[in-house]
Image: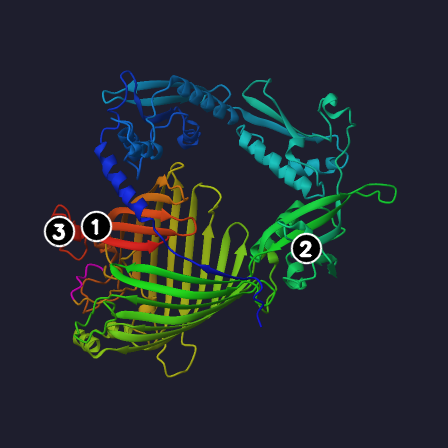
């Protein structure tokens, strides 16, 4: 029987504040009226319109100076519209009404030319030049005032000749650390002949600090490392001297009560104590009463039972008794305990063992306090869906146990169902409906994940994981009934430096399809064996390898990349009655996320793929084909309606292909933060892409991929969107229009100005999460 003592029921409700949405659209309308944000600027004052940095060399990128500017123009929404300034001007104009205070709070005061701020910017630029070795560099400015009360500020940077590192010398009077200085100097990040750079000096200080702490020096910190720079001997050369201070060295004796100067000491671990049921809110109830010694580690509890198996707990502790204190192992222990995902709080600390007549060694006792989180939970989820313009509702009930066998194994059981209104492709009058929904699907999903790979012994530093998944899905649609049974085992490894591999063996999908008489007749009439094969009953037995590389850091807003490549091979593995789908497929997805500033970022994405059927297969199966259009693709087209190639869809059937190419650019801006923590963001975007067939398809002329025609057959769409960021998920609404339609005649594919714009041209997409 499962233990329900820590059972928690969580109900997830998605609620978009209607008043906030209405207020937002009202603010948009009002801010549009403030088309001239400089009209309220007092006489003699000028709005900062633009900052221009003009260096006389490209040694340092202009982007490195931009964060140092103290007088930045009012921010722009989606790259061009000063929405916040316009809103502030409305709130600051005329009689002061109650609602205008809200406009001023949401808005942004005009940023006016300020000579003091300009001078401070020049000082920061000069400091930055010095930090990069340009000690003789200079910074000047000029201001151009325009008739529209805007000003353009130019900063001129003269680098002059930089100072280069002539030599680097390491020294210390600490008798223990002196043994390592030659190694530190040999592996130094500071290289003779390179330009002086304070950032490199800081990185070297951090590197040496970590190296010394990883040699047992528990109390050592970066403040003990000091530099002196000698530039007195001319020729723009700098000698760097790095010195590692002893305790109380180079400190005024009066500040430390004349304490003596001593060497740093190395410390060893004496005892390790781990308590798995610590309660930080009530320490009196957390006093351990039971101790078990397992592989030299003291495991403490209050007598209420062990949260996790001793073997699994100790496997995630990388510190051992009687070994030197090593910061790297301690950091990794913390990270691995955190990844178990069964502890709410993790507190690690040391107690120094007093040195006396009996103990003359420098020792530390390690204490690890672990506070369990709820081990089980249930979720109830409901959502409104819009798949390429097809409205629906969906819901699920799920159960999760994060520690089912007391080894941090995660068992998840979910039961999902949904209703949707889809077009009837066969135009049959036999269209069964529940309310106005004519499509439903239902099915359970079961998964078990654990943090090891059976039969193989990998280093714990590679974070080996295994997940076993089993699912069944039954779909009732106007055109067919389909039941899908799937089973897969996934193995994953996280390599150092942001690399992740996921190997799936096996993945088995059994698909049974029963076509409606009308739809089957329509397929027969099209006389397309490839299309008929797409909807045939089949089984897929495949092997998949996925590689993911990203340098994203959720705690910072710096630029990052995301790259994923997926390969899948599906040969005939079983001799059974079901027809096997045989194919090889590869696809990739690359995106670059550039942080323009605190409030704006721009994302570039490229995705492509190709599938090659072989053996008894004449085409990719439906669920493995490539599709274009929809909320995460080319948003001006509904899902699965774009392509293939320049084919004009006249049969009202979902379109797929063997080849896909997509590219997207999206500019994202923060509009405002609501009092309840919700962030509302705006976006402008352009999407381009299509799918193609590898071979000529007589039922879909002009759908074959030909490299020389690829660019002219790209569907292009653009639009705007809103994102409601609830921190734990993002609700997205995008509105897009077709700009270039490859299904039109070759010389008339640009939609505008060939036709008048109407609201019916807009395709709306409602989705969860960012598109990429």
Q: Which residues are magenta?
A: 645-650
Q: Nearer the viewer, mark 3 or mark 2?
A: 2
Residue at 74% across / 25% down in the picture? 256
Q: Position of residue 687 (x, y in %)?
A: 27, 50
Q: Earlier in the sequence, mark 3 or mark 2?
A: 2
Q: Can residue 574 be found in the magenta stretch?
A: no
Whether residue 115 is situated above or below residue 335 in the rendered picture:
above
Q: Which residue is mark 1?
A: 737
- Disc 2 element: strand
Q: Choose top left, top right, bottom left or bottom right for residue 631.
A: bottom left
Examine the rendering and report whether any part of residue 518 can be seen. yes
Q: Which residue is mark 2?
A: 275
Q: Position of residue 600 (x, y in %)?
A: 36, 39
Local packing at callout 2 (Cα closer than 10 Å; few below 14, some 14-19, many 20+) is: many
Residue at 25% across / 47% down in the picture? 719
Give the side of residue 71 with respect to residue 165, left or right.
left
Query: What is the spatial separation of the Cα atoms under label 3 and label 2, in whole angstroms?
Result: 74 Å
- Disc 3 element: helix
Give the side of residue 333 with respect to residue 619, left or right.
right
- Disc 1 element: strand
Q: Nearer the viewer, mark 1 or mark 2?
A: 2
Give the side of residue 759 with respect to residue 316, left or right.
left
Q: Looking at the rendered structure, which numbered label has been put on residue 747? A: 3
Residue at 38% across / 49% down in the picture? 591
Q: Position of residue 618 (x, y in %)?
A: 29, 73
Query: What is the spatial separation of the Cα atoms under label 1 and label 2, in whole angstroms?
Result: 59 Å
Q: Earlier in the sequence, mark 1 or mark 3?
A: 1
Q: Position of residue 219 (x, y in %)?
A: 70, 38
Q: Quadrant of the N terminus?
A: bottom right
Of residues 229 and 551, the one drawn nearer to the viewer in this rendering: 551
- Furthest residue to the top? 44
């Amino acid at each position: 029987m499962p233990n329900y003592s820590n059972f928690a029921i969580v109900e997830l409700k998605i609620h978009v504040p209607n008043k906030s949405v209405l207020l937002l659209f009202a603010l948009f309308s009002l801010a549009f009226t403030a088309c001239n944000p400089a009209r309220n600027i007092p006489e003699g004052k000028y709005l900062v319109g633009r900052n221009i940095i003009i260096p006389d060399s490209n040694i340092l990128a202009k982007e490195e100076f931009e964060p140092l500017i103290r007088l930045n123009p009012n921010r722009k929404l989606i790259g061009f519209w000063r929405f916040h300034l316009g809103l502030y001007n409305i709130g600051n104009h005329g009689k002061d009404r109650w609602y205008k205070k809200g406009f001023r709070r949401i808005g942004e005061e005009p940023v006016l030319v300020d000579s003091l701020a300009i001078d401070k910017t020049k000082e920061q630029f000069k400091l930055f030049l010095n930090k990069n070795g340009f000690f003789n560099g200079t910074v000047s400015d000029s201001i151009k005032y325009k008739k529209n009360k805007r000003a353009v500020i130019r900063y001129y940077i003269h680098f002059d000749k930089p100072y280069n590192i002539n030599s680097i010398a390491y020294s210390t009077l600490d008798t223990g650390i002196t043994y390592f200085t030659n190694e530190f100097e040999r592996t130094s990040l500071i290289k003779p002949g390179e330009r002086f750079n304070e950032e490199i000096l800081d990185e070297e200080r951090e590197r040496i600090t970590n190296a010394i702490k990883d040699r047992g020096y528990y109390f050592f910190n970066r403040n003990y490392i000091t530099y002196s720079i000698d530039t007195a001997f001319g020729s723009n050369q700098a000698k760097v001297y790095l010195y590692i201070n002893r305790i109380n060295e180079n400190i005024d004796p009066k500040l430390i009560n004349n304490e003596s100067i001593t060497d740093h000491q190395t410390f060893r671990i004496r005892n390790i104590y781990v308590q798995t049921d610590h309660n930080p809110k009530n320490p009196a109830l957390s006093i351990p009463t039971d101790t078990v010694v397992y592989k030299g580690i003291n495991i403490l509890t209050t007598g209420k039972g062990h949260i996790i198996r001793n073997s699994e707990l100790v496997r995630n502790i990388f510190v051992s008794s009687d070994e030197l204190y090593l910061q790297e192992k301690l950091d990794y222990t913390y990270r691995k305990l955190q990844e178990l995902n069964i502890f709410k709080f993790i507190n690690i600390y040391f107690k120094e063992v007093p040195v006396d007549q009996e103990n003359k060694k420098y020792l530390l006792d390690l204490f690890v306090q672990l506070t369990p989180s709820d081990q089980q939970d249930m979720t109830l989820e409901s959502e409104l869906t819009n798949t390429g313009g097809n409205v629906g509702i969906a819901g699920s009930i799920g159960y999760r146990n994060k520690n089912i066998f007391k080894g941090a194994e995660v068992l998840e059981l979910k039961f999902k169902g949904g209703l949707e209104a889809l077009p009837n492709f066969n135009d049959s009058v036999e269209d069964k409906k529940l309310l106005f929904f004519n499509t439903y699907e239902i099915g359970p999903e079961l998964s078990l994940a654990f943090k090891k790979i059976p039969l193989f012994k990998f280093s714990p530093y590679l974070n080996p994981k295994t997940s076993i998944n089993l699912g069944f899905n039954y779909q009732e649609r106007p055109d067919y009934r389909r039941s899908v049974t799937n089973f897969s085992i996934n193995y994953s490894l996280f390599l150092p430096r942001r690399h992740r591999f996921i190997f799936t063996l096996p993945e088995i999908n059994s698909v049974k399809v029963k076509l409606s008489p009308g739809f089957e007749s329509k397929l027969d009439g099209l006389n397309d064996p490839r299309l008929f094969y797409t909807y045939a009953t089949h089984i897929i037995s495949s092997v998949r390898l996925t590689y993911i590389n990203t340098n994203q850091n959720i705690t910072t807003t710096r630029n990052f990349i995301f790259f994923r490549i997926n390969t899948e091979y599906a040969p005939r593995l079983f001799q059974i009655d079901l027809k096997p789908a045989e194919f090889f497929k590869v696809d990739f997805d690359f995106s670059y996320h550039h942080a323009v500033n605190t409030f704006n970022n721009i994302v570039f994405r490229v995705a492509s793929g190709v599938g090659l059927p072989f053996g008894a297969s004449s085409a990719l199966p439906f669920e493995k084909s490539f599709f274009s259009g929809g909320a995460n693709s080319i948003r001006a087209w509904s899902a699965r309606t774009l392509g293939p190639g320049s084919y004009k869809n006249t049969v009202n059937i979902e379109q797929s292909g063997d080849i896909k190419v997509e590219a997207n650019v999206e500019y994202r801006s923060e509009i405002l933060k609501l009092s309840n923590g919700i962030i509302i963001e705006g976006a402008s975007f352009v999407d381009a892409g299509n799918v193609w067939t590898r071979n000529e398809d007589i039922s879909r002329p002009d759908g074959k991929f030909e490299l020389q025609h690829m660019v002219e057959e790209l569907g292009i769409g653009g639009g705007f969107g809103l994102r409601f960021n609830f921190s734990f998920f993002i609700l997205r609404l995008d509105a897009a229009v077709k700009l270039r339609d490859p299904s039109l005649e070759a010389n008339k594919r640009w939609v505008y100005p060939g036709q008048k714009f109407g609201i019916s041209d807009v395709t709306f997409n409602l989705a969860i999460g960012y598109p990429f």
